[in-house]
Each structure stands twice: as C-alpha cells, then as structure tokens.
Image: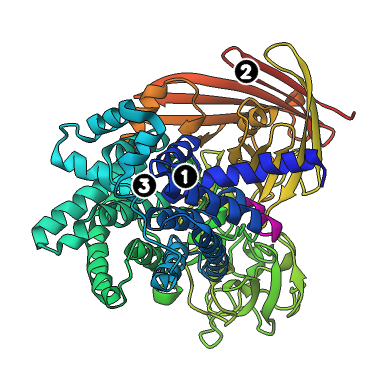
Amino acid sequence: MTIQKMKRKFDETIAPAILNSYSAIFFSKSRVLAAVILAVSFFNFFAGLGGLIAVITTVLISNAMGFDQLQIRNGYLSFNALLVGIGMGTFFDPGFVFFSLLILASLMSLIISVTMGGWLYKYGLPFLSIPFIVSFWFVTLPASQFTNLGLTQHSIFWINDAYAVGGNSLVELFQKIDNLPTHNMVNIYLRSISSIFFQDNLIAGILIAIALLISSRIAFTLSIIGFVSAYLFAKFSGSSATSLTYYNIGANYMMTAIAVGGFFTIPSKQSYLWSIFLVPLTSLILLFLSQLTSFVHLPVFSLPFSIIVILFVYFLKLRVTTSKLILTPIQFNSPEANLYNYQNTKERLSNLYYFPLHLPFWGEWTVSQGHDGNHTHKGDWGKAFDFMIYDQEHKTYKSKGQICEDYYCYNKPVLASADGVIAEVVDHLYDNEIGAIDTVNNWGNAVIIRHATGLYTQMAHLKRGSFKVKIGDFVKRGDVIAHCGNSGRSPIPHLHFQVQTTAALGARTIDYPFAYYFGIKHNKQELQQFSKPLEGDLITGLITNKLLYSAFDINPTSVLKYHFENERGEQKTEEWEAFTDAYNSNYLYCKATNSSAFYVNDGSMFYFTSFYGDEKSLLYYFYLSAFKVFLGDSDPIERNDSVSINILRGNKIAIWLHDFIAPLHLFIQVRHTIQPIYQEKLINTDSIVLKSTIQSSIFGRKTIESESSSTIQENRIQSFTYQSGKTKIRAKWSNI
C-alpha cells in the first residue's frame, strides 16, 4: 500500500473510527462530544492512555480483518474496547503485564462485539456495553493471579497527576472548580455523568455535560430525567445505598433514559414516560445482580442498563400493531435528527414498514365495500375491499342490469398489485345469474399471489376461463391475471381484494394499505400514499411518466457528472457514483466531497431519505432540489412534503430552544413543494421543468429558504439551479 493510500485510509476510516469510539458511548457521532470525552479521559493519564491504546488496537485489527467499514468508522466495534482500556487504566498500575493484558482484553471485546452483533442483528438488537463487561470480568477476576499486575493509586490521588502536568496553578484551579458551592443534586448529577468514564470530579462532569448539551439537547434532558428518576425512586423505596453510587447513576440510570427515550425510540411524550418507568426497573435489576455477583467479587458495571434496554427494544419489536411509541426506523445517531427525520418522512418512509401494493385494475373504480363493511366484510375477513365501476348517475350497469354483461366492471382486466409468484388458482366455477349467490364456493374463482414471506394478495369472484396465469408463474406488477366476474358469493359482478399472511383460500385478512393511488373528488385527483380508501371513494391507479421515470431511474453503477458555477463564480465539476450498501439502500456518493445522499425509487416516487457529508457540495444542493419527485403522469399541480428542520441555516437559537420541547410539541415546520411544468401544457412531452421551493414556518411566520429548478430532457436531469440567499448554483450535465 502506498503512502498516499495509507493516508487516505487513515483520513477516511481510522481517524473517524478512533474519534467516534468516544462519542458512540452516548450513541452519538458528535466530534465536540468525542473530543471532550477524549480530553477528560486523560484527567487520569494512564486511564486515558489505556483507553486510547485499546481503541487504536481494536480499530487497526478490525480494519485488517476486513470487517464492515461503516461499523468500524462509526466506532461500533471499538467503543467497548475504550471502556475496557479506561477501566484497566483506572484500576491497575501500568507496566509490561498491564499493556499485554490490555491488548488481549481489547481483542476479546472486539471478538465479543462482532459475535454478539452478528447474533443480535438477526433480531434488530444492540449489544451495548456487554462486550466491555465480559472482557473486563475476564481480567479482574483472575487479577490476583498476576503477581506483576498491581492495583493503581492514580485514581485515588489524581491530583498528583494534575500537579505533574501544570504545577500548583493547575492544582489550585482544579480544586477551586471541584469545590464550587453547587447544590447537592447538581453536584451528584455532574459527578455521576463523569463516573461513566470512571471519573469522580466536578470538572469532568461539567465538561461532559456541556459537550452533551451542545451535541444533543434531547440527550441532555434525558440524562437529567434518568438522574432524577433514580434519585427519587431510591429515596422513596429506601433501596440500598449501593444503587445510588455515582457510577450506577451515570452508567445505568442516565444511559437507560438516553437509550430508551431518544435513541432506540423516536423522542416523544411516551418515550419520556417509559424512560421514567424503566429507571426503577433498572434499579431492581441492579440490586439483584449486585447480590448475585458479590459472591465472586465482580462489579456489575453497566450490565443492568444493557439488559433492560435490550429486553425493552425486543419487547417493542414483538408488538402486533404500532403505538405512539415508535422504534427508530433509520438511525442518525442523534435524537433530534431521529425525531425530525421521522416526523418529516413518515409518508415517504412507509416502504420501510410496507411492501408496496398497488391497485389491481386500470381506470376509475369505486370502493363499494371497504374495511369492516356492512355486508360481508366482518370479523377475521373484515379488512378487505370490494370494487365496482359506477357511471355519472351512480349506477353500476347499463340497460336493465339483468345480465353480467350489463355491468361496467364485468370482464374488465384484473392486475397483479405487485411482483410475485402465483400460489393458488381456482378457475372452474361459472358466473352466477344476477341476484343469485353460490354459498358453497364463497370466493368463487380466485387467484392468490405470494409477494414476500407472509404477504399474499387474494382476488376473488373472477370470470371462469379468463385466467392468464397458472400456479408457479412469476408475475410483475400490472400484469393481467384474469378478468372480473360474478362467481362465488357474489350477487352482482365486482372485484374482491384482500391481503393475508398465508396461501390458503379465504384466509384471515390483515389491515394493509395501498402504496399510491389517486382519490378523485370534484373531478380533481388527490395523490394518496400508503393509505386505505374508504367505502364510496372513487379511485384510480397511477400511470408512470416515462421521461421522469427514466431520468430518476438511477441504478447502482450509474455515474452522474455535472459542471457548475458556484457562488464565487468558480467553474467546477462534481461526479456522483450510485452504490447499494449492505442494507440494500441506494445512495449517490461524491468522492471529491466525501458526501452521500441516500435515496429510494419505488417506481412511483423518487425521494431522498438522508444526507451525510459536505453541505456546500453540489450533491447537497441536488438533494434539496429533488427532495421528492412524483414519477406519475398527473395534472401540473404543486405537491408538498415535510423536510427536517436540520436543513435550516438561520434561526439557530430558535432551533436550539426548539430541540428541548420538540418531543412534546413541534413549533417549527419546514415544507418542500415541487411542481412539474410541462412544455406546451402537454403531459406527454420531451421536456419537463420541476420547480421546487423549501419554506420554513416558525410560530406561523413563513420564510422561503431556497428555490430550485430542474430541467428533465433526453431521459436525464439535464440541468438544475439552486438559490438560497447569496448562494446561487447553476449545474449542467457533463459528458466530459
């Protein structure tokens, strides 16, 4: 490997991994928090040195062994080694044996982290600080057998280290701060937060608390909630004094509140309440484990926190229906970012919860019976739809309606609502005469399609002999399956549609939405996303605009290159490569700015989900310009979507204050609007201009943050402009 490649590897992976190992302890990627924790760890020099050596060792080994670069870079595989190193440096004297055991313990924490991570990943669960606890136990329990490993006095007489660094002036400063006349509760809180890193002084607590406040107002608030809950519960219950040590308050109660209240769940009133409830439960586990491990003289450390958080996350995952307490769908390593991105992308991220199903027909149909209808949709079969076609007089038939052929929906094509495999076909029953029903063969002729594990769609009452498929055939969304008929328990022609978890004919229905469709009211189309139409609704499916679809059909291995002029008038070129990560997420990556923009194209909608990197890059301006693009043919009307308030440049004080109460109430809103402008007012055109605007609203006061325009030609995004304040960007497709 050349020196240049080694330097790039260090800059892109090694250095970020080392720094993120420190902030990862608070579930963060804040550089400010990481730098403060790194500095504070050296208040006890050998503890700080032990932690740094452990982190460097773990990062280098995990990188050399070829583990996932993202996990390495985020510090997920090395933060446990950091705790091992700080702990060993706190309790043991430095020496050859110490450093040898430190390397071995760091390696053990890495092995346990990778192994536990692989096992728990299947269930979507974290391993938290369990690797640190187990690794440290393996060192402390046999420590008496190592005659050349002695207990240190540095943690007791840390002031001697301060004298060695800065003399009397530094000692006097430390003593002055450490003896500040603070309220007892404040003093306990600050010392508790410092004890997470085996410290016990006011200075460390003040620095970490300030850094935590800067990196996350929600995490800071939750640390106070965890502390107060633990303190009040201990006083109320009269529990053992050991449960209120600085370390137990910091590493167990505060961390439980932060993890449950703002990291693994979306911050809300419910998450805050659960944080309060789970702290006493953590205390019970702590007292139990303290008694249990006292027989072998092992400290409990943060094991209660790890147990309660893992159990609670798994507990939430087993719910049949979601409540207002939402597990974080995409992790941004910031409670604020998690909250704002969830609130502003609930509709766009519905594909994370639902496999997209589309309407099983062409044209305009009406829901003649919806979920839990008044006729046949009852009990276990209540979550189904019946569809028919009505005319302007609200009749379902022409002439006298005495034969099946009189009904508008009869013999109309029935489509596959998504890609899948034909699991069942029934095609031997004749259509009923109008008004008659077949109570023996309830579903009549039917087809069942398997779309994914545990996800099937059934369409019933189809016409005999109209089937275009057989069992085992693979079908794509929109393929004609059969035609609408009047077989089974059907007095008049209609299409029955339901979603179920098995391939059994007439299985129990499940409550499931359609991905996209138009609701029609007063001759105007209104786009519906991942919703369920109501009885009486007139609806129609989407028709994809080929030009828009081709332009935004950015497949992995695609390369987009744009020449642009920045706000300083400089001519530049930026190239974006499309990739797919280990989690099957698509993203555009700009190597020059080390920026990534994650996106989804589900055939009906193109939208960005997140951005990481340089917010002055052209990729970031494109991310804001094409934040959400509808790919279907429609009237040239404006479409709206929410945007995370993190994109706001001004009003930093308002945003900062907003963070404190955001889980309870959002008073800042940011909206993205986009409108297609068709050439010569024709939908089928070879040129489309997309006009977009981002607008903020703070206490109802609206401000335009940015305006963009994208020109779609020759099946690509030919050019786009972006303007925000003094920033004006003009970019054009480059073939060079």
- Residue 515: x and y in percent read 57, 54
Task: Mark 2: give few (<14), some (14-19) or many (20+) Cα within 10 Å.
Answer: some
Which residue carries the number 1 mark? Answer: 23
- Residue 462: x and y in percent read 65, 73
Which residue carries the number 3 mark? Answer: 267
Task: Mark 1: give few (<14), some (14-19) or many (20+) Cα within 10 Å.
Answer: many
* Separation of marks 1 and 3 at Cα, in angstroms: 19 Å
Which residue carries the number 2 mark? Answer: 723
Residue 514 visible from this viewpoint: no
Q: Nearer the viewer, mark 2 or mark 1?
A: 1
> At label 1, which amino acid type do we have?
Ser
Point out the stretch of residues depicted in magenta.
Answer: 63-70
520 vs 167, left or right, is: right
Among the two numbered marks 3 and 2 on one chain, the one whose residue lies closer to the N terminus: 3
Determine which quarter of the picture holds residue 119: bottom right
Image quarter in which the C terminus is found: top right
Q: Nearer the viewer, residue 702 or 368?
A: 702
